[in-house]
Image (cartoon, rainbow, N blue to C red):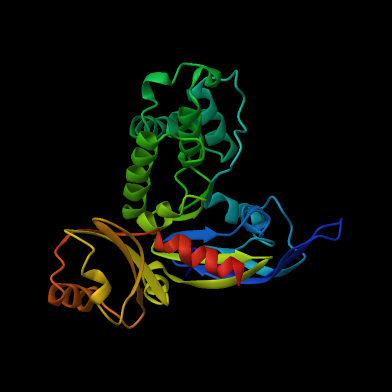
Amino acid sequence: MRAIDVQQLQKTYASGTVALKGVTVSVEQGDFFGLLGANGAGKTTLIGILSGLVTPTSGTGKIFGFDIDTQRDDAKQQIGIVPQEFNFSIFEKVWDILMAQAGYYGISAKDAAPHAEVVLNKLGLWEKRNQPSRALSGGMKRRLMIARALVHQPKLLILDEPTAGVDVELRYGMWEYLTELNKNGTTILMTTHYLEEVERLCRNLAIIKNGEIVKTGSVSSLLQGMDVRTYVLTVDSTANVATVKGFEFGAMEPASVEVTLRKEQSLGELFDALKIAHVQIFDIRPQENRLERLFLDTIRA
């Protein structure tokens, strides 16, 4: 049984806007899955359908085997969702927000309290539990959104831009917690514009463009399938680099050079060629995020 199983989902709004054009995508139980797409590509509509907030025009969808149309309540019980925008009362206390959410899923405050305490501690919010949410920083409000989504212990966590507006330190802390959640069995579906998050956290991904899934697969296999990759080398001198044949060298500085490798070329072959040319290498790093190149190439095609 898959965590998410979507077949030929279509959505046309009353305005005539076609948001989804027969989307088929699946997410296995226990996966950490990235959904990428430009603004307006259909990500929010797809998430809205999965969470029961948007009714599809046609097609089917299941959450852990529960049909999102005919078994909507059962399907929604499996999901915790973190939307892009803050949507809790700024006057309510942190603890009360979590207890109200638990009640929405039919869980008493007494039964929800132990897990709520664990979640708030993990997200660094326990000391803020009796404060109104308006007193929290932006990053803390984002973590509160995650805590609220987890209070009923869902099997599937859907994160829509979870680290937007969060500083680097908090982002890394949230990455660690999400990784721990996933290792403990929670399936995670995440949209983000921070592509390094996907490369670091996700095992599989799908790219949606104009309401259609245009690429899907494991992150590793998709990156390995790229035609070229560019690196920046720090060397003792670039004087002899020009004598190396068979490789595409770009911008050069006195002690650094860009080199683009084709799919069939390896770093080992490059190092051997530079060694023969008496070029000593001190450091190597990717010129850009490889997933960013893959994403841009896909949506521009």
Instruction: Say left or right for 72 vs 161.
Output: right
Instruction: Give above or below for 180 relative to 129.
Output: below
Instruction: Say left or right for 277 vs 221.
Output: left
In the image shown, does 158 or 116 lie closer to the viewer?
158
Image point (34%, 41%), residue name: 172
Instruction: Say left or right for 12 vs 254.
Output: right
In the image shown, does 173 or 4 lie closer to the viewer?
173
The spot of residue 177 in percent (x, y) is: 34, 43
User: Which residue reaches farthest front?
Assistant: 239
User: Which residue reaches farthest right?
Assistant: 15
In the image shown, does 96 or 297 lie closer to the viewer?
297
Asked whether the viewer can see residue 187, the reply is: no
Asked whether the viewer can see residue 135, the reply is: yes
The spot of residue 276 in percent (x, y) is: 13, 77
Image point (26%, 56%), residue name: 254
- Disc tally is 0
The spot of residue 82 in percent (x, y) is: 54, 43
Instruction: Give above or below for 47 relative to 250.
Output: above
Image point (39%, 30%), residue name: 120
Quarter of the figure with residue 260: bottom left
The spot of residue 53 in percent (x, y) is: 69, 50
